[in-house]
Amino acid sequence: MSGSPLTRVAALDALVDALRSLPGVGPKSAARMAFHLLQHDRDGAARLAEALRQALAGIRRCSLCNTYTEDALCATCADPRRDRRLLCVVESPADQSAVEQTLTYRGLYFVLMGRLSPLDGLGPKDIGIDQLVRRVQGGDVEEIILATNFTNEGEATAHVIAETLRPLDLRITRLARGVPSGAELEYVDLGTIARALVDRRGA
Amino acid sequence: MSGSPLTRVAALDALVDALRSLPGVGPKSAARMAFHLLQHDRDGAARLAEALRQALAGIRRCSLCNTYTEDALCATCADPRRDRRLLCVVESPADQSAVEQTLTYRGLYFVLMGRLSPLDGLGPKDIGIDQLVRRVQGGDVEEIILATNFTNEGEATAHVIAETLRPLDLRITRLARGVPSGAELEYVDLGTIARALVDRRGA
Ligand SMILES: [Zn+2]
Ligand SMILES: [Zn+2]
């Protein structure tokens, strides 16, 4: 248990401490959450405990794309209407979910276990790049769309994947950079505008 | 389940939804929390599920002061060194915890179930004022210290409790208002300074 006990009730201190596992939750908000659940939402607390239990027991990685699923294959990989020639590589199920919500992509995915991060000791194997190579060698993939994030680490990850897959006979693309939809140029950072100028396309 | 499903994994959607029971957690941060737990902290998720289960099973209200406890009497009420002539009335276990952490109070507490809030349909009975009256009539209490919050509702609650207990032979006090410790007057709101002037004391 970390930090000083807030109360003299062990089960309450343990709950406050466990809530701090959640990203972005410090000691004060963990205490507020614990008091809220006990005082106003015991049903919600019971539902959360059960949802955690079921998620841990039932959710695993898709054997083909590595995303979360309750079956051997995820719903996307098992869907015969998806275009099996396209493979979009993302850093996480959350990023996959973001791409999927655009409703513009009909291919398949490969979900990395994060991004390359030498400082955190995460190399190509740790994030599943070898698994990606096997996936590409075994399938009908003709184009790899690199949709890692546009951070330094995401860019480095895309670069390493591109170099790793280069010997295979594949088209390798990267999501376009540019000015975000709906943005006013006045408020867009200069690097983004500069890149959008360089990458300008016929209108 | 509220909102649109984020994923096509039922157990994951249920977890995201359950995390929204936590105060201050919207759909985006609930999804971020769920992905984080599954991807990086399955131990933390298991610990949280277990802490919730144990808190729900083990934590109840102290029969004397109404705060959270795992026993019939809380540690404070059961402590023979506490001064049983002083009873500090607070709105919640969180507020009790704040007073207790000052290490300056050696009396007992009575923890209301919140504050009077006519708009939310919370009257004196709902927040336990009748239980407080019985507590005072049954014990050795000589002074009631009203430590409800200095909000409109907290002030109204203090006022109603004072009027309700007035017929009993008790000293009834309220926490002092004034300039917060460490504050620079320049940055303190004028109402607080005005009240501190009126309540000024010998130095
Ligand atoms: Zn899959
Ligand atoms: Zn007690």
Image: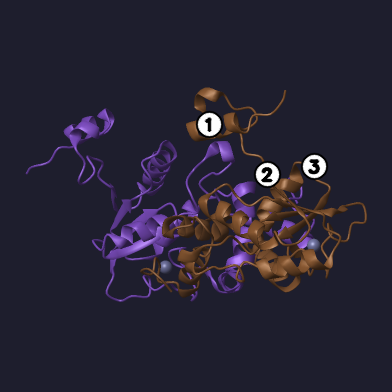
Chain colours: A brown, B purple
Question: Residue at label 2?
Answer: A175
Q: Chain for mark 2? A: A
| Residue nearest the viewer, comparing B187 with B9 | B9
Helix or strand or loop: what does disc 1 sit on?
Answer: helix
| Residue nearest the viewer, comparing B58 with A195 | A195
Question: On the image, which quarter does residue B55 sit in?
Answer: bottom right
- Residue at 64% in and 59% down: A163
Do we see residue A34 in this rendering? yes
Please tell me in which quarter of the rendered image ligand 2 is found.
bottom left
- Residue A135 percent location from the top left of the image: 78, 66
- Residue at 49% in and 63% down: A20
Q: Earlier in the sequence, mark 3 or mark 2?
A: 3
Q: CA distance from mark 1 to mark 2?
A: 17 Å
- The number of numbered badges drawn on the structure is 3
Q: Which mark is residue A194?
A: 1
Q: CA distance from mark 3 to mark 2?
A: 15 Å
Q: Chain for mark 3? A: A
Q: What is the three-letter code of the residue carrying label 3?
A: Leu
Question: Residue at label 3?
Answer: A103
